[in-house]
Amino acid sequence: PVIFLCNHRSWGDFWVDCALLGGTSFVSRWAVAFAIPCAALWGWSHGWLWFFKRGAKRAEGTTKWMGNFFRHSHAAFPGKGVVLYPEGTRTTEPKGLPLKHGGLAVAHQLGWPVQVVITTNKEQVMAERSLSLGFGTKCVTSVSAPLWPRDYEVCDDFIAAVCTTWRNTWEEAYGASTDAVSRPHAVLPGATSRPATSVAPCRSGTNLARLCFLTFAFIWFWRFLYAGGNNTTIVDLHAFGSR
């Protein structure tokens, strides 16, 4: 599997990068699931969201744990690459942020090739801070050649090569002419659309019904826990459950 290293500009990155790369998996922290519970549940059940708890202490070490986590997640959903946002967080800085080395060390340990994929104007497609969508936004994407860990015996040398490639690919994407001819489809040349396989082996209608039920259950639980309900509210809920 290929690890695609993409720039992280907004929440819209998930949709844009998925469309560009033909339906990949994504590595994400569990906190995202609470922000977008419906999409998170759907993505997890269909193979394109790999959730982990950031900051947790791992007995075997973070790099080794993440390597095992990647192998296990990919084994459950084979045939798909995975997107990693090596900057670690969203930013709209003109040059982005320095890359976090942890994910790159995991790639070297696994021996999985990486490709840098830089796309402009993703923050204009979906800007969560201003609650706006940019229809008709033109995005320019630059893709590097694959970098193979087997070509770098020392992990630090591999990380240095990735960082150099990241900067070169960034400059190529953001320095490209905006007069280029648009593609008829979002998927990049050479990319193959790969449909996900649900972890729930049932008909799509059944899984959709499950999703709706879990969504309503989550909303009910959230209201019960955080709405500041008084004793009257609790009594009413118990009465409802006993009918």
Image: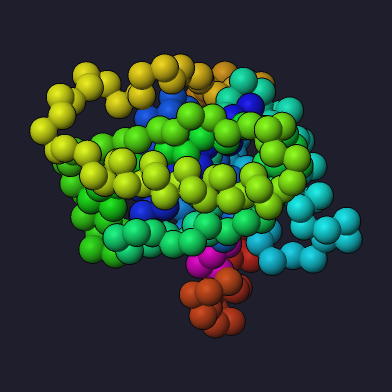
Can residue 38 be seen? Answer: no
Tell me, yes or no, whether the highlighted magenta stretch contains residue 222: yes
Front one among 78 and 43: 78
The stretch of residues the image draws in magenta is 219-224
Can residue 118 be seen? Answer: yes
Indicate left or right for 224 with 144 as reference. right
Please tell me which residue is depicted at 53% across the width and 78% down the height of the picture. 229
Quadrant (top left/top right/bottom left/bottom right) for the N terminus: top right
Front one among 153 and 212: 153
Question: Is the residue 49 above or below the residue 151 in the image?
Answer: below
Find residue 68 and report its horizontal and vertical position in percent: 79, 42
Toward the left, the furthest residue is 179
Front one among 59 and 130: 59
Task: Please tell me whether the stretch drawn in magenta is mainly helix, strand or loop.
Answer: helix
Q: Quadrant of residue 179?
A: top left
Find residue 120 and report its horizontal and vertical position in percent: 28, 45
Indicate left or right for 100 with 140 as reference. right
Find residue 25 and report its horizontal and vertical position in percent: 55, 35
Tell me, yes or no, whether the highlighted magenta stretch contains residue 21: no
Quadrant (top left/top right/bottom left/bottom right) for the C terminus: bottom right
Please tell me which residue is depicted at 42% across the width and 49% down the height of the picture. 167
Please tell me which residue is depicted at 30% across the width and 26% down the height of the picture. 186
Question: Is the residue 181 above or below the residue 167 in the image?
Answer: above
Indicate left or right for 100 with 78 as reference. left
Please tell me which residue is depicted at 41% across the width and 17% down the height of the picture. 190
